[in-house]
Image (cartoon, rainbow, N blue to C red):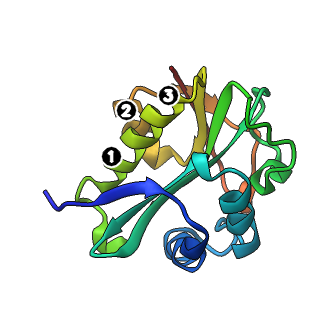
Amino acid sequence: MTKYTIRMVAPDDLTACHTIEARCFSPAEAAWASSIETRIQTYPEGFLVAEYDGEVVGQINSGSTYKDDITDEEFKQLIGHDPDGQNIVIFSLSVLPQFQKQGLGDQLLGSFIKQARDMGKAKVMLLCKDKLVAYYTRHGFENEGTSASTHGGEQWVEMTLLL
C-alpha cells in the first residue's frame, strides 16, 4: 500500500483542495474556492488532507452543528456552524482520480472518524449519491433515506454514523 500522510489542513492547501474538489465533482456540485477557504480558516480541525510526496492529493472537510437537518445550503459556507455542535457534517471526501482505488479515501475517512470521536462528537453525517451508499455502509454509516437536498440538481442520500 502506498504511504500517505494524513494531516490537518493548512492555509497554503487552498489551491490544491479546490483543484481536487473541481476534479471530483461537477461544476454544479463542487464547492467554490471561497467556501473551501472559509472551511480552512473557520474549522481546520474538521478538515484533513492526504499528502503523497509533498503534494495534497485528497481531502475531507466538514462543519459542526447541533442540528440534525443537513440540507441547508448555507451551512456549506459554515453559516450556522457551531464548533461545539454534537454533529459533524462531512461536505466533501475527495481524492484526485489518479490516486483513487488505492485505499486513500478509506484512510482519510478513518482518520476523520477517529478525530470526530476524539473531539467528542455524537455522530458523523453526510449526503452522498446512491452509488456511494455501500461504501459508507462499509464504514458503519446507516442509510437514513433520500434527502430533501437538491444540491447541484442531484438526488442525495442521507447517511449517519453514531460515534
Image point (33%, 75%), residue name: 54
Identify whether 103 is placed above or below 64: below
Callout 2: few (<14), some (14-19), or many (20+) C-alpha neighbours within 10 Å? few
Image point (42%, 33%), residue name: 114
Image point (30%, 56%), residue name: 104
The percent position of residue 5, horizontal first and vertical second, equals 31, 59
Label of residue 118 in the image: 3
Q: CA distance from mark 2 to mark 1?
A: 8 Å
Q: Is residue 162 left or right of residue 11?
A: left
Residue highlighted by disc 1: 106
Q: Are marks 2 and 1 in contact (CB under 8 Å)?
A: yes
Which image quadrant for residue 140? Answer: top left
Q: Amino acid at mark 2?
A: His
Q: Earlier in the sequence, mark 3 or mark 2?
A: 3
The percent position of residue 17, horizontal first and vertical second, equals 54, 71
Label of residue 139 in the image: 2
Callout 3: few (<14), some (14-19), or many (20+) C-alpha neighbours within 10 Å? few
Q: Is residue 80 left or right of residue 9?
A: right
Q: Amino acid at mark 3?
A: Asp
Image point (72%, 72%), residue name: 32
Query: Which one is nearer the viewer's eye here, 11 or 57?
Result: 11
